[in-house]
Image (tube, rainbow, N blue to C red):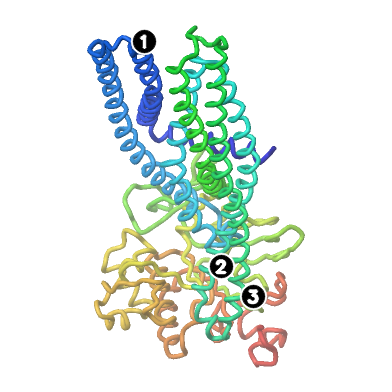
Amino acid sequence: MKTKQAKKGTVRRVLTTMLGFYPVMMPLTIACIVISAVVSSIPSIFMQNVIAVMEENWRDGNWSAVSGRILRLVAILAVFYILSLIAGLAFNQLMAIITQGTLKKLRERMFGDMQRLPIKYFDTNNHGDIMSRYTNDIDTLRQMISQSFPQLLISTITVLTVFCIMIYYSVWLTLVVLAGVIAMLAVTKKVGGGSARFFFRQQKALGRVEGFVEEIMNGQKVVKVFCHEEASKADFDKLNDILFEESRRANRYANILGPILNNIGNILYVLVALTGGLLLLTEAPNLSLSGMALSISIAVPFLNMTKQFVGNINQVSNQVNSVVMGLAGANRIFELMDEQPEQDNGYVTLVNAREENGVITECPERTGMWAWRHPHQVDKTVTYTKLAGDVRLFDVDFEYEPDKPVLRDISLYAKPGQKVAFVGATGAGKTTITNLLNRFYDIADGKIRYDGININKIKKDDLRHSLGIVLQDTNLFTGTVMENIRYGKLDATDEECIAAAKLAGADDFITRLPEGYQTMLSGNGANLSQGQRQLLSIARAAVADPPVMILDEATSSIDTRTEAIVQRGMDALMTGRTVFVIAHRLSTVKNSNVIIVLDHGRIIERGSHEELLAQKGQYYQLYTGAFELE
């Protein structure tokens, strides 16, 4: 029951979405389809009239009078056919615009909605499966909109029109046709229902296969390093076998439906012919809306109407596969669009400001000084706090999953200009703390204050504008080196980007590239070394010039010589900024103001490098090599 309701809801949503995108064009297209379908049903009436004229006059041999009437009927029919042709051409052109336009706007909405999703969604969903919604699911929806919907509408209108004509001429023969149609609908429901279930499962299996392929492509070097090719093939074959099985079952049902319905249609045609012949031979009274007696002029067109009626019922059944696959694809598309977006209830914003006589005021132009604009809801006043980079955590608890704490009772502070380093084994909670500062995740308990303001009150966009982050895993985009650096600040000038590259120590290798800063990068910068990619990532953070920097293993992929170059640039970058450093190389954290040692989500030691060595605790063991981080 829930599946049927879901399918009905999906159909309704697809139609209302199309109507919302094209409020004028959609009704016009439907009108053209109706005209085309109705006109295609009319020839049976003309055939009946022509045969009736021939029946009336064949004994007299007055062919001149007959030919005039027949020619008039043919001329009228030709006019109807021309109308049908015009309507058909119009709806096909309009449908092409509606189909491609709907898909274009759906992709835009999907991508826009995806940008508003929290990081947690991408951490918990396979990226290849998400991509499958933009490719396979969109394509199945395209086929449903462009082919199945128009054909279903044409067939439905044709069936209704022909049914009305059949009732008009003979109720008895119509009842025979209806008996056959009931049998066809029963078969369609039984077979089509089984097909629908497996087509839904097929789309999910296809998403899993594409997700696995995407994962293996990204990790191809690791696969080859560990000689994991055969194991990867075996894993792929398992997923592919599942996809094959779901597809086989779905298409098994779908492929037997057509032949069954065709044979029922052929049997029905014979039954109508036999019934019509018996009624004519026995001269049985005809029951009809027209009041006409049953004759050859009714029986012969009725056979054509039976074929037309059954043929359109078959057309409906033939579209079941496309409709079901399209609905499965649409359902997955709407699932992505309906995901809960990242919540942001913040109201404190970041503004340009100037300070005169100790008073901070907001100004429209850029001054190089930023301030938090804090509207107070109680007394309706607005206060301004200078953006300084003072970050404090009070008794913070956090868990990714219920009852599985990752951080417990974390309290620390970083005053403006201080450098705080996090040290600890993998999984100790170092990166999690920086995720909480960015509000990629929200804390379960405690408080985080930024310049004295609870970060829950700060709008996420403004909060993240004030933070710079260099991740361990670099992400470069298709574009020039200059564009990748400018990603940190879209309105940065070329001079600012070059200055940031020099500060990060990236200018030297960039100028040696074939086209310097205009060198095109693709495939996540595959034509650069890991160290060069990391240098560009550091330059990208540098051009943003934020007061707070987060360096998450920023130099882990750089050799010792390059690290010395980068460290000089990083030291210049960190001057006057609050910096949080996550590092396994203890040489990179020695000059920090405070080093915090984490273990299983708790702070077990804190102090300067010298203080921690004097304590001879875990940091001392790490530094002297008596204890391994991993």
The structure residue drawn at horizontal position 63% and vertical position 69%, both measured from the top left corner, is: 238
Q: Residue 333 or 3: which is nearer the viewer?
A: 3
Q: Earlier in the sequence, mark 1 or mark 2?
A: 1
Q: Which mark is residue 596?
A: 3
Q: CA distance from mark 3 to mark 2?
A: 39 Å
Q: Is residue 337 visible?
A: no
* Amino acid type, callout 1: Glu
* Image quarter of residue 38: top left
Closer mark to the observer between disc 1 and disc 2: 1
Q: Position of residue 184 (x, y in %)?
A: 60, 35
Q: Name above or below for residue 540 compared with residue 43.
A: below
Per the image, the residue denoted by label 1 is 56
Secondary structure of the residue carrying tag 3 is: strand
Q: Earlier in the sequence, mark 3 or mark 1?
A: 1
User: Image point 31% across, 9% down: which residue?
Assistant: 60
Estimate the x, y position of residue 5 in percent, counting from the top left. 64, 36
Residue 519: x, y in percent?
28, 74
- Mark carried by residue 212: 2
Rendered image quadrant of residue 535: bottom left
Other-residue count near label 1 (Cα within 10 Å), few / some / many at <14 / 14–19 / ≥20: few
Q: CA distance from mark 1 to mark 2?
A: 74 Å
Which badge, 3 or 2, comes first in the chain's sequence? 2
Q: Secondary structure at mark 1?
A: helix
Above or below residue 591? Residue 40 is above
Mark whose residue sits in front, 3 or 1: 1
Q: Position of residue 602 (x, y in %)?
A: 72, 70
